[in-house]
């Protein structure tokens, strides 16, 4: 099934390319309204270099650009349809940096991923149909819908997925190839692959990174592992769970270096 890139006007008056109105509205609320990536002392400054890993249509890339004009954004999105919207948004708004159609993990090469055309935010390397349904059910209930309404919505959701191949890069390889001296904010949202993204950073590159904000799916001790890793590399770390995600195991981790 083909999904065309369309445009819509956000509540702040900005026009964006998108592929799903509901997802775009959700992202706007999280990123622009709730400012979920600028909490616990996380900040953007003039001239910052931002890495957006799991960029989807580029809503955070756009936010960073509008929040602090002059930042450079390196955005990575593996799925072709969201990437088309990401590229359109980068071009429309003249965002300095580079958008690349690839995934980021702990080994470079080519891998297969599952793409959900009608739920693109849940696409990734670790797809699980039953877990996807349970997550959507919990989000619906936490969002205030009745169990009957949630069941109805889930019944109407197309049960479609596509297996696609995507290039995969390691973050340290990107740092070397692009001559990156510093990453001021590393944002990661990769649907259960966050540990692999972090594992692709060599010890010598960690001092280049000033701030990290990552979504963590707490499976097999992932949350404790990520928090311990970041603290071990000199970050002050805060982990929290939004009320909407209560009972899902999805947490957000914010880490920043504090000047001595």
Image (cartoon, helix red, strand yellow):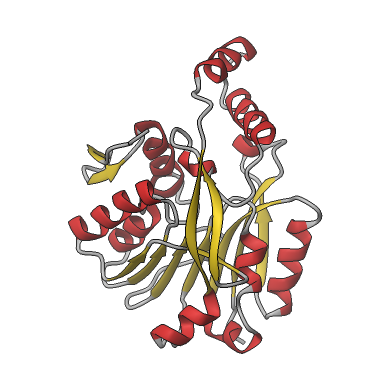
Question: Residue at the location (65% across, 85% down)?
Answer: 203
Q: Which quarter shows the N terminus?
A: top left
Corner quadrant of residue 58: bottom left
- Residue 148 at x, y percent in the picture: 61, 10
Q: Position of residue 225 (x, y in %)?
A: 77, 64
Residue 99 appears left or right of 170: left
Q: Is residue 117 above or below residue 105?
A: above
User: Which residue lies at the image location 81% right of the left edge and 53% below the top edge?
Assistant: 220
Kindly tell me whether residue 210 is visible in this rendering.
Answer: no
Side of 259 relative to 92 (left or right): right
**Quarter of the figure with residue 49:** bottom left
Residue 204 seen in render: yes
Q: Quadrant of the C terminus?
A: bottom right
Q: Position of residue 253 (x, y in %)?
A: 63, 59
* Residue plotted at (76% across, 50% down): 219
Side of 71 relative to 38 (left or right): left
């Amino acid at each position: 099934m083909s999904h065309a890139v369309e445009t819509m006007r956000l509540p702040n008056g900005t026009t964006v390319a998108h592929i799903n109105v509901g997802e775009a509205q959700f992202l706007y609320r999280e990123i622009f309204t709730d400012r979920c990536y600028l909490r616990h002392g996380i900040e953007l400054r003039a001239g910052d270099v931002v890495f957006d890993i799991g960029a989807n249509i580029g809503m955070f890339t756009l936010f960073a650009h509008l929040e602090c004009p002059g930042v450079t954004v390196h955005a990575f999105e593996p799925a072709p349809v969201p990437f088309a919207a990401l590229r359109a948004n980068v071009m429309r708004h003249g965002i300095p940096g580079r958008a690349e159609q690839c995934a980021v993990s702990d080994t470079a090469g080519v891998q297969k991923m599952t793409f959900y055309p009608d739920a693109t935010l849940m696409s990734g390397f670790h797809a699980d149909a039953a877990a996807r349904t349970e997550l959507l059910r919990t989000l619906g209930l936490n969002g205030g819908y009745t169990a009957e309404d949630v069941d109805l919505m889930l019944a109407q959701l197309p049960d479609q997925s596509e297996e696609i191949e995507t290039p995969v890069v390691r973050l340290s390889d990107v740092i070397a190839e692009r001559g990156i001296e510093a990453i001021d904010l590393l944002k990661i949202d990769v649907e259960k692959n966050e540990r692999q993204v972090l594992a692709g950073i060599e010890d010598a590159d960690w001092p280049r990174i000033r701030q990290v904000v990552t979504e963590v799916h707490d499976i097999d001790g992932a949350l404790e592992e990520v928090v311990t890793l970041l603290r071990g590399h000199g970050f002050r770390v805060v982990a929290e769970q939004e009320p909407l995600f209560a009972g899902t195991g999805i947490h957000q981790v914010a880490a920043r270096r504090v000047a001595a």
